[in-house]
Image (cartoon, helix red, strand yellow):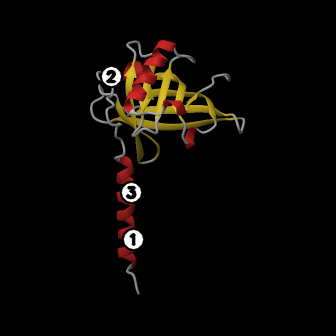
């Protein structure tokens, strides 16, 4: 059977486009979760310490994890994540970008570290002074508790854990991040 090379290239291109579209549109928010609104982007910028997370392959074996958010010239947000891999005894860094999904006063963003592929980044709780935040991804596999300091008050911790449990998150599987390196 002879296959037309042009047809094959077109089919492969269409398939790649469909796959890319499915990844770029994968910026949902878990059922029942509501992003913070009104949200102040400028107050959210700066450095955050990861207090806890649901583990996944890109953060496996990392402690001392921080996220630094700054404004890019084009209006997107630069995302600079760093962490210490305690199994390899070395620092890892990943730089990406985030964009709002809709209005910038709604804390629903999409973040990308790999070209056109985006994932949901939804701030579902933040205190009035923007010192503590609860962030979820597209589904119940992604959750982060963040703080401007290396610790978080027990009252905030309890409140965020309860909120996560009410949405269906398995908080028993959280990894509590150590901060013992400079």
In this view, the residue farthest toward the left is 103
Where is 96 relative to 16, above or below?
above
> Which of the labelled discs sits on residue 134, or is there none?
none
Q: Are marks 3 and 2 in contact (CB under 8 Å)?
A: no
Give coordinates of residue 112: x percent, y percent: 44, 41
Report if residue 14 is visible in the image.
yes
Mark 1 or 3, nearer chain start: 1
Dot 1 or dot 2: first in sequence order is 1
Q: Nearer the viewer, mark 1 or mark 2?
A: 2
Image coordinates of residue 168 in percent, x first then y, are: 40, 33
Q: Which residue is mark 3?
A: 19
Compare residues 168 and 24 and report the one nearer the observer: 168
Q: What's the CA distance linking mark 1 and mark 2?
A: 45 Å
In the drawing, does residue 156 fall left or right of residue 181?
left
Q: Which residue is mark 1?
A: 9
The answer to whether residue 52 is left or right of residue 61 is: left
Viewer-closest of 84 and 125: 125
> Quadrant of the image for the N terminus?
bottom left
Query: Element under label 1?
Result: helix
Q: Foreground mark, 1 or 3?
A: 3
Q: Which residue is mark 2?
A: 39
**Disc 1 and disc 3: Cα gap in Å?**
15 Å
At x 46%, y 15%, the residue is: 156
């Amino acid at each position: 059977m002879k296959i037309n090379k042009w047809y094959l290239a077109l089919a492969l291109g269409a398939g790649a486009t469909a796959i890319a579209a499915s990844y770029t549109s994968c910026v949902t928010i878990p059922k029942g979760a509501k992003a913070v609104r009104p949200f102040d982007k400028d107050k959210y910028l700066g450095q955050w310490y990861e207090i806890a997370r649901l583990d996944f392959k890109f953060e496996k074996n990392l402690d001392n994890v921080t996220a630094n958010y700054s404004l890019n010239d084009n209006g997107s947000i630069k995302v600079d994540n760093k962490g210490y891999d305690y199994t390899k005894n070395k620092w890892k860094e990943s730089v990406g970008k985030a964009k709002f999904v809709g209005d910038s006063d709604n804390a629903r963003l999409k973040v990308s570290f790999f070209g056109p592929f985006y994932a949901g980044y939804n701030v579902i709780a933040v205190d009035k002074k923007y010192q503590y935040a609860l962030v979820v991804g597209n589904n119940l596999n992604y959750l982060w508790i963040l703080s401007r300091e290396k610790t978080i008050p027990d009252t905030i911790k309890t409140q965020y854990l309860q909120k996560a449990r009410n949405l269906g998150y398995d908080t028993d599987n959280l990894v509590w991040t150590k901060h013992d390196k400079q």
